[in-house]
Amino acid sequence: MNKKISLHTLYRLCDIYDFLDNLDDNNGFITSKRLGERLNIASDTVRKDISMLGEVGKTASGYEIKKLKNFLSKKLKIDNEIRLCVVGLGKIGRFLLNYEKFNSGNFKLLAGFDKSINKLETINTKIELFTVYDMEKIIMDKRINFAVICVPSIDAQKITDRLIESGIIGILNFSQVYLKTKNKNVIVHNIDFAGEFRKIISEAVLKKNFFL
């Protein structure tokens, strides 16, 4: 990247990439106006954010979709292989084992872990499954560097500490507790469904679309 960009800008750029990645047709051009409308951000913000990464080229017809997608992928380093595992194979964990995007493109879901051997024997999936007791060895052997946690709250912090000790550098946390890490280089995103709905409600109130 040519300039230091904020997290807000980074997240918007990732949203732009995700939108492009989900288009049925990657041919042709797309305008900053259309991107802004679909992502609920101003068109000039779209142009400014993209320009923070350097020159990509823009015509009167807009951005060339394939070129913009490849540009964002390389600049944001999301074209690198993402080797990940899921820890905790309850309902959410089992769903993620078969989540299409975790098994396509540069995503490589390489392992699922659970503490219940009986549960592992009942799960139908193409992903290799292991007990959490073997977690460190499997992560290092398979060179896994990202993890999704779907374990009960009481186990979440202990699992997190073990993952970090195994070399995990990024964690998506679906447990109902906010995780802490002593390693500042490890990124943890806590996913709280109820919290996300509160944000939606607050935004609706702000826009006067919803009244309590």
Image (tube, rainbow, N blue to C red):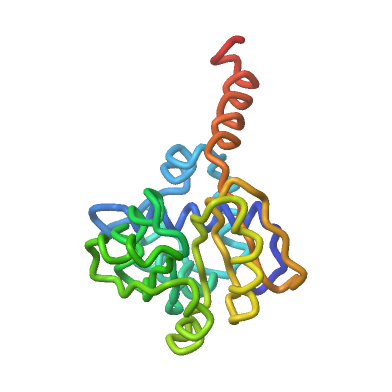
Residue under the point 59% across and 68% down: 53
- Furthest residue toward front: 118
Residue under the point 44% across and 70% down: 85
Q: Work out whether residue 211 or residue 154 is closer to the camera in this orientation and state it.
A: 154
Q: Work out whether residue 24 or residue 136 is closer to the camera in this orientation and state it.
A: 136
Q: How many marks?
A: 0
Residue under the point 37% across and 51% down: 30
For the question of whether residue 171 can be seen, the reply is yes
Is 2 left, or right, of 74 in this rendering? right
- Furthest residue toward bottom: 141
Rendered view: 12 above or below 157: above
Is 35 left, or right, of 177 in this rendering? left
Query: Which percent across, then down, holds residue 186?
Result: 67, 71
Is 135 left, or right, of 26 in this rendering? right
Is 62 left, or right, of 156 in this rendering? left
Q: Give the image quarter of residue 212.
A: top right
For the question of whether residue 62 can be seen, the reply is no
Residue under the point 63% across and 63% down: 52
Q: Work out whether residue 69 or residue 200 is closer to the camera in this orientation and state it.
A: 200
Query: Which percent across, then down, holds residue 112?
Result: 39, 69
Quadrant where the N terminus sits is bottom right
Rendered view: 7 above or below 31: below
Q: Give the image quarter of residue 114.
A: bottom left
- Furthest residue toward top: 212
Query: Which percent across, then down, holds residue 178?
Result: 67, 51
Query: Which percent across, then down, holds residue 206?
Result: 65, 21
Rendered view: 184 above or below 40: below
